[in-house]
Image: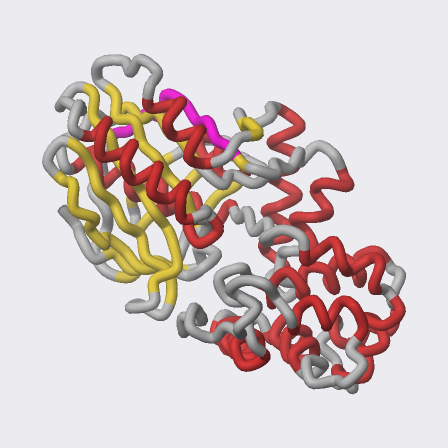
Amino acid sequence: MKDDHSARSATGHADNRSVAQAYANQVDYCRSNDATITARIVAAVAGLLDDPEPGAFVARIRDWPGRPLGDAVPLRSAGGLHALQLSGRAPELAPIYAGEPADDHAIIARAVREHEAFLMPWLDGPPQTNEAGRSWGFVAAMLWLAGEGLPPRFECLEIGSSAGINLMLDRYAYDLGGVKVGPAEPAMRFVPEWRGKSPPDSAITIASLKGCDVAPIDLTVPEQAMRLKAYTWPEHTVRFERLEAAIAAAKAKKPDLVHMNAADFVEQQLALPQAEGTTRMLMHSIVWQYVPEDQQAQIVAAMAAWGAKATQGRALAWVELEADRTLLGHGLRVRYWPGGEEPRLIAAAHAHGAWAEWFDAA
């Protein structure tokens, strides 16, 4: 994906080229991830950008006051339209979401024109793309860290937890290249297509899981769960099945999720006493781009400061499953203290956990 920092007008708004490029990039990304319906929706919205009378929804997109790609504006608009379709208020959208041939431009133009009041709030905040299929990366990282000699008992801290689906990863089972982890009767089971050698077959224990979000979602509230469903790509039916399983798990026991910004949460949690024989692990997936730069700097500084105090018995780790432009996909990076401060790319992955390519079998 291309960076859009330089494509700004004198007012500080993104110019039309930047917005159009963000939409073009998103279309390409959707197509490469087998999301053809979402690609059609995004392309149809992009086709309205040059409309001389676009209406408030498209005008706000066209005059976006920031980074259209970094702010995931195409996904915000797609989420709004998917929510509109799920609500049943715009039956004209049905052919597109059924994957049938249709005049996408005309259908989306009508929906946007007639349902602006419904759609506008979907541009107010970043997408909520909580996905249980990404939890494999956190578990694989724990196996790797234990293989590196860190204490195999983990205190997990997640930023940008959304609905806390990955804060229930201890209730899921995994088969990671033949290495099996998790309970005998899991809420979900993940067996990504594995490429490369297997991760270390380490015995690990999850002592705790706690997370934060600036706009946390309560899975047990149907209206809030619907927001996650709207951001789930309609082509990926397995993700809807996972979401229903996560809702059931949350109803049985809610994840430990607090309303707090990422930097404050990290600083607060790192300052708490840490038990001997544990590894405290910061983790996040497809979140970092949404964290404001000042908060990113706070988190980096806090991890470095507490990392300097880490010991073999009270270790600190940082696990990131984020978009990686060099891979043209997503990468699993891990660093730890003491001794492994430099980030190491240990795997590449599908955005929703369909496959993983292991780089480091240490």
Q: Position of residue 329 (x, y in %)?
A: 38, 65
Magenta residue check for 208? yes
Seen in the picture, residue 120 relative to 147 is either above or below; the reply is: below
Q: How is the image coloured?
A: secondary structure
Q: Is the magenta stretch mostly helix, strand or loop?
A: strand
In screen coordinates, is 43 left or right of 278? right
Seen in the picture, residue 82 relative to 180 is either above or below; the reply is: below
Say which residue appears at 37% left-offset and 27% top-offset: 267
Say which residue appears at 55% left-offset and 47% top-offset: 130
In screen coordinates, is 88 left or right of 155? right
Say which residue appears at 37% left-offset and 50% top-offset: 321
In screen coordinates, is 32 left or right of 55? left
In screen coordinates, is 310 left or right of 136? left
Magenta residue check for 331? no
Say which residue appears at 45% left-offset and 47% top-offset: 292
User: Which is nearer the eye, 3 or 256?
Assistant: 3
Corner quadrant of residue 36: bottom right
Corner quadrant of residue 115: bottom right
User: Which is nearer the eye, 233 or 177?
Assistant: 233
Q: Position of residue 215 (x, y in %)?
A: 61, 38
Seen in the picture, residue 240 relative to 6 is either above or below; the reply is: above
The residue range painted magenta reads 203-212
Is residue 41 at least partly visible in the picture?
Answer: yes
Seen in the picture, residue 210 relative to 230 is either above or below; the reply is: above
Q: Position of residue 353 (x, y in %)?
A: 44, 55
How many discs appear?
A: 0
Q: Where is residue 10 in the image (x, y as percent from the top left)?
A: 53, 73
Residue at the front extreme of this rendering: 10
User: Which is nearer the eye, 53 or 71?
Assistant: 53
